Image (cartoon, coloured by chain):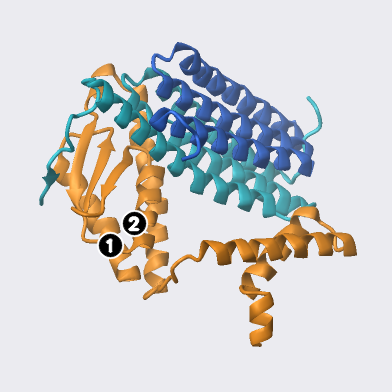
Amino acid sequence: MSAAPDLPLWAALLVSALVIAGALVTLIGSIGLWRLPDFYSRLHAPSLGATLGTGAILIGSMICFSVLQSRPLIHEVLIGLFVTLTTPVTLMLLARASLYRDRVEGNRAAPEHDPEPTEL
Amino acid sequence: MNAAAILGWSITLAQVLLVLAMACAAMRFIRGPRAQDRIIGLDTFYVNAMLVLLTLGIRSGATLYFEAALVIGMLGFVGTVALSKFLMRGEVIE
Amino acid sequence: MSLLRRILPHPLLFLALLAMWLLLMQSLSPGQLLLGSLVAFGGCWVMVALDPPPVRMRRPQAAIRLAGRVFVDVFRSNVAVGRIILGDAERRTHSGFMSLRLDLTSSYGLAILAVVLTCTPGTQWVHYDPARRVLMLHVLDLVDEKEWVRIIKQRYEALLMEIFE
């Protein structure tokens, strides 16, 4: 295997667990993209990878580089901030674009009118 | 088995999982059936590629991978927003 | 002071952007200091051009409680959506649209609610009508609408109103 950083054993185990968990959550989200039946359900799938998946891998990376003390953690913080801010924007825009298209075409995938507000 | 080997193998495993995730997203992109399905596949593909770069960065320790991850994230975001705008109105800038 | 304000409208933002640049570049050379100052200066003037309405946070400790709740809920909803995805096909057919009336009107509060609802898998913010104050959502596991209204109103909206209104 190509060289991985030489961490103490506890840190190596922790980083490994976090990175694998993050990758697994991302994979489940992408499987959802494949398995869920219609477009609006599929919209829920990518946020698995964008929240918990990215979060776990970024925290693993932060632990790795703070133990190594080789560089500041600013990249991880920026990537985390960026992903949390951009994912909702893209998903929301896609949902609205798709709703608009479905309504224009008169598909049955989207309701013709907004559902009545549910009251408690 | 020392700590570096454990970390190396786990990162490889994570990369395999992430590449499988990218394959799922690519399948959605190819299959469609509608334009919005393809866009969401592409967006997920971008995010997964960013995560692969992060794992590469943990292995090598080079800052370059993290910068590349940031750039991929940004390009993916701008691309998806432009495509969604196009779906909604037929033009990108109103 | 006023002269400084006129040249440099947001001094704290300037310092934060400069610090971010220097950390990203990992150097303190005069060239990077100059470049970083230019970038931070531009960022400040972009902020002036955008002219965002001022944020009034009433209770910062409520914001910490909200962050804790969101953290827990992201975990829980990830597990819930993961089980729906990997479970049998019947469970994947309960999705649907729903609406609810919001009492929250602050635009920052609504923006945070949008980010929270979209970032937790299982709920997707679709459309908010400010005239009727009605929010339309898509929910992956739509068995009981009332339960979701209760979650959103009691877990998030009450706290957000405490923070911003």
Kind of residue sitting beneath label 1: Thr
Residue visible at 19% across and 29% down in the picture: A111
User: Which numbered disc flags the more N-terminal residue, 1 or 2?
Assistant: 1
Query: As displayed, is residue B46 above or below residue A9?
Result: above
Visual hue assigned to chain B: blue
Residue C105 - label: 1
Mark 2 closeness class: few <14, some 14–19, many ≥20 residues within 10 Å: some
Image: C162 above or below C42: below
Instruction: Report the residue that reaches farthest toward the bottom.
Output: C1
Measuring from the top left, give residue B84's x and y in whole percent: 45, 32
| Residue at x 46%, y 17% (from the top left corner) | B28
C15 over A8 or under it: above or below: below
Q: Colour of chain C?
A: orange
* Tag 1–tag 2 contact (CB < 8 Å): yes
Q: Colour of chain A?
A: cyan
Image spot of residue C21 (x, y percent): 74, 58
Residue in the foreground of this view, choosing between C92 and A78: A78
Relative placement, left or right, of C100 versus B11 is left
Seen from the viewer's position, the closer of residues C4 and C18 is C4
Mark 1 surroundings: few (<14), some (14-19) or many (≥20) residues within 10 A: few
- Relative to C35, is B24 on the left or the right? left
Report how far apart the C-alphas of labels 1 and 2 lie in the structure. Answer: 7 Å
In the rendered structure, the residue with mark 1 lies on which chain?
Answer: C
Where is residue A1 drawn, in percent x and y?
Answer: 78, 24
Relative to C135, is C35 on the left or the right?
right
Location of mark 2 (residue) = C110
Q: Amino acid at mark 2?
A: Leu
Callout 1 secondary element: loop
The residue positioned 66% from the left and 88% from the top of the image is: C1
